[in-house]
């Protein structure tokens, strides 16, 4: 087990390193330059060149990468060119914000999706199953900004029951924060719902048809106990995998939702960095996202292995 | 989700057995309600893409500066936008560029992905390992974020968007193809080909490829929906199709700020159009997946 | 109107030739009272003195500072929340160029004089008076005594000289270079004594006092020796507020500076909140999360524009868009073609569609209706499609032609570009639009595009636009316009010190440009801010500055 974890962590680190090189190279390809962003579009080319030199952006790409990696190893994320301030506080605030949003989205989506999937599986073939499946499939098709727009118009403006901006006024308590996060969370949840519901349904059906379940029923155990104790556990396994694979998607979806609902999260920070051609900020944000993704997949893999007794014993697949 | 093509074991070529399977699948497809609903909507949009410009009562470019932000009426079925353009016309004609870009991007991604999948699946070894690490690194980034960064670097244009999305899809498709190829290469017909001294590229192209076409087609249809999704999202973020081509994502982005002023029609219809197109493609893809799975 | 000749003579005693000239103009009724106050203040006559003269001439005596917003006296002690646009980069007073940044520095920083947005007349701020010499090549400013920075140190001429030297620094690019180029150099600022500073200009300039007023938003006075790149940490200044905290992406909080020279500071706290786009600002205002939104555009703000629950602060300004045509490239090198393009636009409709009427019409020259020196007798160009087509035929393009237009995706310009395309279509000109993001446009197309549509912010006098965009070798001459007669007229205008001369030269320039039409300007749009009806005493300028020392709740 420990070997397995170490191996996975090792692979993840290699991937991360490759990722950092890719991002750094792409970042350097961005047009425009930091000097221009700071001094504005009317500044003379000479003035911009002077500032660029002062910032050190005209050095060779290898030198800049080396410096960047060294700093990163010491925990220094560098200085944002456009804000002329250390990057780390921006990232930590944005990351925390995004995690809050993701958490609310998960809390709304996952229980609902799993429940729907299980119900659909239990009533497989009947109209409830069909409607849930079609509903899930339809939601799958809505880009987050589309569902976000619908949500804003219906709940934010026409019915006026939920706030249209995700950022609460300063100093708001947790309840107010969640209140502001409901609409964007639903927008994200919409797309996740379909995937999770499908996996839960498939997993439940498979579990219901397994020998173990049939034996339990024959032994006289009530269906409900069977479902709770055995079926759910096996249905959860594929669900966790799906959730893990959707993390990457979730983070990308965050970008759009944060932009639409004006929320200062890691997605909108990345977007701002790309727009402003702020290399250090862009590299830091993208790398952060990469780390989050790899960590999440790692945790999901390990949890899956832990929960799946077959894999643990190392028996046949 | 690989499909197992029902072939007589040992034979390596696509013979009438496979053709018969396909005919059966097609018949099943036509019976499926999901497929029918999806296909109808899709056909509707394809028709709009082809003849839309000629059919609409106003062009999507005509501006009526004295009647900006007009609500839906008999004159303008979907109302007008901020510079007096007919929203109905923009919705109907807006599908063309989305479909073309999404389709081409998916084709590009499928071709690249299949090639990549064939190579890594067949060769294995260090070629497979190295490429897979790179692919993993790229996949650690959400699609939208990568697209935003790349297009910020290259500047938005129809070609850039198409290539960017296509290239980003390739690794995802490659994975599926790779899995399929790994399963196939153990089969007898491949061994037979190798014994015949056929070279690698020949085996990949003429032996393996026809037999993994099924999962490739499924991937194509699944990705198409996602491509439409992504094109719309990129346009919304300002990194997509450049104006003045009518484009749904662009129109939503331009007019979302006036929704709070009560001008809901400028955004709702375009959003509905995107939703219907993506759902239609997904329904079709889902039906195809189900049919080829059984 | 009854005149008091004796009093008048008394007041005239000891006045310089220029000052007497202006008083003559007023007495003879050649300029209005408002104009007299404005012109007089430019050359340094104090407001009380001007008022006294005006009274002696029989006019009513009133001061001109208008506070915008609701009527009623604002109450003290309010905690005001202001929605503003996020500054694009670090707050370095010499480098900022954007609205978000300039709003930040003027919360705590102050200028030598303040350009009153309602009247375009200069009010004393850190300088109590100023006067030019006979040919307007040397300007002497007297500083206000008893002014201290928020840390207690007194403000003297040393600080003023330092601030100006930093903003005319030849070695490092500073944003004010566009204003000071050809006007003032680094060594032109001289301290005379602790309370007096002299500006020795490169050439006579009749509008210089405007060029260093609050219109030149970088020109706040900071303590001698301040490191501008670190100013963001302290926001040190002489103004009514001092910094409590600043977070780059989020906002800034200010507390009152009770040792401010200007009197009582009403608000107990200012909280500026930054937004990326306008829509959440309006939503926040409607939801009660903010009290004031600084700088809005009409598009998208319909919910608060004609709403009795909100007060609209509408300031006329000289913000505009210039559509330049390359005068050195076919087919635009023929002025008939340029005129035809200008005649294709329906300006009132465009102003209505893009700004809901909160704009004034432009006449294809830098003299906005807003400027006092504008000669308004020059006829306003209007749409004339028949004449336009005629001119095209005359120029040898009876069936039109195809060309390209480059512009930026900024505010309403995307829509404006498409309107231009439509208008040109009607006379046979087929325009291919290229709409890029700002950075790409400015870098690759602004000064080279065969047709180029660019944004210009507000300025109190037309000097900068006159020289930079149209003189030979001008830094912003996107039209590549080269007209010696024009260059000569501009030189005269810049040197002219009294209004009638300025107006007369302006008229000539306007007529010349109407004929040559190197660039088209269809509108000058207002600066708009909006506040809750219950808040009064807010002063906003065409630049986007917002002054809140006298703001608070009113019972109106």
Image: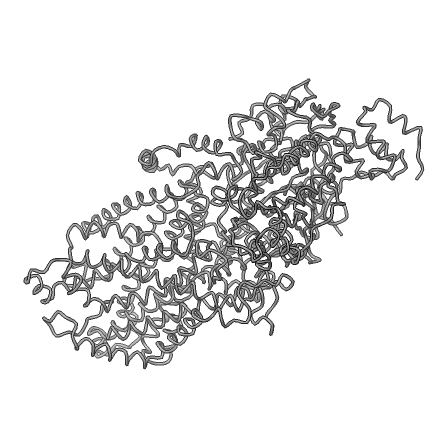
Residue C481 in which image quadrant: top right
From the top left corner, tell me how far across and down residue B192 is, in percent.
7, 65
Name the outermost residue toward the top: C193
Q: Nearer the viewer, residue B219 or C467?
A: C467
- By what rule are the colours in the image chosen? one colour
From the top left corner, tell me how far across and down residue A291 is, in percent.
33, 48
- In the image, residue C236 above or below residue A230: above
Q: Is residue B90 left or right of residue B144?
A: right
- In the image, residue A134 above or below residue C211: below
Q: Quadrant of the N terminus of chain C?
A: top right
Q: Is residue A246 visible?
A: yes
Q: Is residue C223 visible?
A: no
Residue C190 in which image quadrant: top right
Q: At 71% across and 58% down in the image, what residue appears?
A: C308
Q: At 36% across and 64% down in the image, what residue appears?
A: B103
Q: Is residue C368 left or right of residue B76?
A: right
Q: Nearer the viewer, residue C323 or A73?
A: C323
Q: Is residue B21 left or right of residue B63?
A: left
From the top left corner, tell me how far across and down residue C450 is, in percent.
52, 46
């Amino acid at each position: 087990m420990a070997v397995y974890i170490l191996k996975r962590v090792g692979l993840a680190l290699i991937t991360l390193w490759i990722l950092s090189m890719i991002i750094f190279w792409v970042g350097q390809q961005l047009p425009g330059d930091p000097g221009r962003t700071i001094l504005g579009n009317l500044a003379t080319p000479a003035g911009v060149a002077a500032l660029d030199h002062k910032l050190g952006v005209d050095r060779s790409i290898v030198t800049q990468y080396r410096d960047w990696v060294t700093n990163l190893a010491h925990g220094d994320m560098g200085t944002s060119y456009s804000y002329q301030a250390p990057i780390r506080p921006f990232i930590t605030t944005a990351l925390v914000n995004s995690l809050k949003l993701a958490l609310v989205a998960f809390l709304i989506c996952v229980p609902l999706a799993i429940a729907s999937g299980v119900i659909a599986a239990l009533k497989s073939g009947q109209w409830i199953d069909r409607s849930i499946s079609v509903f899930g499939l339809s939601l799958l098709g809505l880009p987050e900004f589309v569902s976000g727009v619908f949500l804003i118009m219906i709940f934010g403006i026409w019915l006026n029951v939920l706030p249209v901006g995700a950022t609460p006024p300063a100093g708001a308590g947790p309840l107010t924060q969640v209140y502001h996060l409901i609409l964007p969370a639903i927008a994200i949840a919409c797309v996740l719902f379909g995937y999770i519901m499908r996996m839960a349904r498939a997993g439940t059906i498979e579990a219901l048809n397994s020998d173990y379940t049939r034996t339990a029923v024959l032994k006289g155990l009530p269906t409900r106990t069977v479902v709770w104790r055995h079926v759910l556990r096996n249905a959860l396994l594929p669900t966790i995998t799906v959730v893990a694979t959707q993390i990457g998607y979730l983070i990308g979806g965050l970008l759009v939702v944060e932009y639409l609902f004006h929320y200062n999260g890691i997605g909108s920070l990345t977007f701002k960095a790309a727009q402003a051609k702020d290399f250090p900020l862009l590299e830091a944000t993208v790398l952060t996202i990469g780390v989050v993704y790899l960590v999440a997949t790692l945790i999901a893999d390990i949890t899956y292995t832990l929960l799946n007794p077959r894999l643990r014993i190392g028996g046949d697949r | 989700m690989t499909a197992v093509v029902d072939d007589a074991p040992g034979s390596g070529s696509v013979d009438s057995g496979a053709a018969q399977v396909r005919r059966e699948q097609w018949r099943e497809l036509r019976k499926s309600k999901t497929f029918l609903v999806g296909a109808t909507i899709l056909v509707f949009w394809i028709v709009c893409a082809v003849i839309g410009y000629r059919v609409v009562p106003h062009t999507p470019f005509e501006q009526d500066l004295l009647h900006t932000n007009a609500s839906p009426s008999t004159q303008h079925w979907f109302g007008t936008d901020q510079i007096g353009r007919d929203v109905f016309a923009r919705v109907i004609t807006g599908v063309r560029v989305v479909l073309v870009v999404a389709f081409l991007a998916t084709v590009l991604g499928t071709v690249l992905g299949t090639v990549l999948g064939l190579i890594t699946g067949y060769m294995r070894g260090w070629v497979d390992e190295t490429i897979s690490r790179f692919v993993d690194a790229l996949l650690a980034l959400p699609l939208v974020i990568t697209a935003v960064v790349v297009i910020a670097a290259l500047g938005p244009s129809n070609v850039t968007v198409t290539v960017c999305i296509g290239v980003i899809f390739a690794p995802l498709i490659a994975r599926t193809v790779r899995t399929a190829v790994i399963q196939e290469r153990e089969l007898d017909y491949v061994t037979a080909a190798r014994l015949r001294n056929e070279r690698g590229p020949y085996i990949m192209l003429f032996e393996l490829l026809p037999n993994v076409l099924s999962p490739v087609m499924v991937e194509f249809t699944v990705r198409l929906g996602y491509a439409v999704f992504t094109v719309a999202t990129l346009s919304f973020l300002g990194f997509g199709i450049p104006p003045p081509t009518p484009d749904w994502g662009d129109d939503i982005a331009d007019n979302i700020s006036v929704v709070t002023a009560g001008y809901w029609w400028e955004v709702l219809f375009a959003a509905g159009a995107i939703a219907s197109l993506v759902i239609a493609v997904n329904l079709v893809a889902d039906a195809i997946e189900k049919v080829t799975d059984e | 109107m009854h005149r008091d000749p004796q009093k008048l003579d008394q007041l005239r005693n000891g006045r310089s030739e220029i000052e007497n000239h202006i008083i003559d103009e007023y007495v003879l009724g050649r300029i209005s009272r408002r104009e007299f106050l404005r012109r007089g203040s430019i050359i340094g006559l104090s407001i009380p003195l001007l008022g006294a003269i005006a009274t002696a001439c029989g006019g009513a005596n009133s001061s001109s500072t208008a506070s915008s917003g609701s009527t009623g006296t604002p109450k003290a002690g309010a905690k005001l929340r202001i929605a503003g646009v996020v500054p694009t980069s670090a707050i370095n007073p010499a480098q900022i160029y954007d609205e978000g940044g300039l709003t930040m520095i003027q919360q705590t920083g102050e200028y030598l004089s303040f350009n009153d947005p309602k009247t375009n007349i200069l009010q004393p701020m850190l300088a109590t008076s100023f006067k030019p010499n006979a040919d307007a090549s040397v300007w002497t400013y007297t500083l206000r005594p008893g002014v201290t920075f928020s840390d207690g140190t007194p403000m003297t001429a040393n600080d003023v000289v330092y601030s100006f030297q930093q903003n005319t620094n030849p070695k490092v690019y500073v944003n004010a270079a566009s204003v000071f180029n050809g006007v003032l150099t680094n060594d032109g600022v001289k301290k005379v004594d602790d309370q007096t500073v002299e500006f020795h200009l490169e050439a006579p300039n009749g509008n210089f006092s405007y060029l260093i007023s609050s219109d030149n938003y970088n020109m706040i006075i900071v303590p001698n020796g301040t490191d501008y790149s670190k100013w963001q940490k302290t926001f040190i200044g002489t103004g009514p507020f001092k910094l409590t905290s600043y977070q780059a992406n989020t906002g800034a909080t200010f507390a009152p500076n009770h040792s401010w020279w200007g009197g009582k500071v009403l608000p107990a706290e200012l909280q500026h909140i930054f937004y990326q786009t306008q829509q959440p600002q309006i939503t926040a205002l409607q939801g009660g999360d903010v009290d004031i939104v600084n700088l809005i555009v009409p598009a998208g703000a319909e919910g608060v524009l004609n709403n009795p629950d909100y007060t609209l602060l509408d300031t006329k300004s000289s913000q505009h868009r210039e559509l330049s045509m390359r005068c050195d490239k076919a087919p635009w090198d023929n002025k008939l073609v340029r005129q035809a393009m200008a005649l294709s636009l329906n300006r009132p409709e465009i102003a209505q569609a893009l700004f809901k009427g909160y704009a004034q019409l432009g006449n294809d020259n830098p003299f906005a209706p807003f400027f006092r020196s504008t000669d308004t007798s020059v006829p306003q160009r209007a749409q004339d499609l028949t004449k336009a087509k005629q001119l095209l035929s005359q120029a040898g393009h009876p069936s039109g032609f195809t060309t390209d237009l480059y512009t930026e995706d900024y505010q309403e310009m995307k829509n404006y570009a498409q309107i231009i395309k439509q208008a040109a279509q009607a006379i046979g000109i087929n325009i291919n639009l290229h709409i890029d993001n700002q950075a790409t446009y400015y870098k690759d197309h602004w000064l080279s595009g065969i047709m180029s549509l660019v944004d210009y912010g507000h300025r109190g006098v037309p000097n900068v636009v006159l020289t930079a965009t149209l003189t030979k070798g001008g830094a912003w001459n996107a039209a590549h316009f080269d007209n010696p007669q024009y260059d000569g007229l501009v030189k005269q205008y810049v040197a002219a010190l009294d209004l009638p001369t300025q107006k007369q030269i302006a008229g000539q320039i306007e007529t010349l440009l109407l004929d040559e039409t190197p660039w088209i300007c269809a509108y000058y749009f207002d600066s708009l801010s909006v506040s809750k009806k219950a808040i009064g005493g807010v002063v906003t300028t065409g630049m986007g500055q917002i002054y809140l020392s006298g703001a608070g709740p009113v019972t109106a």
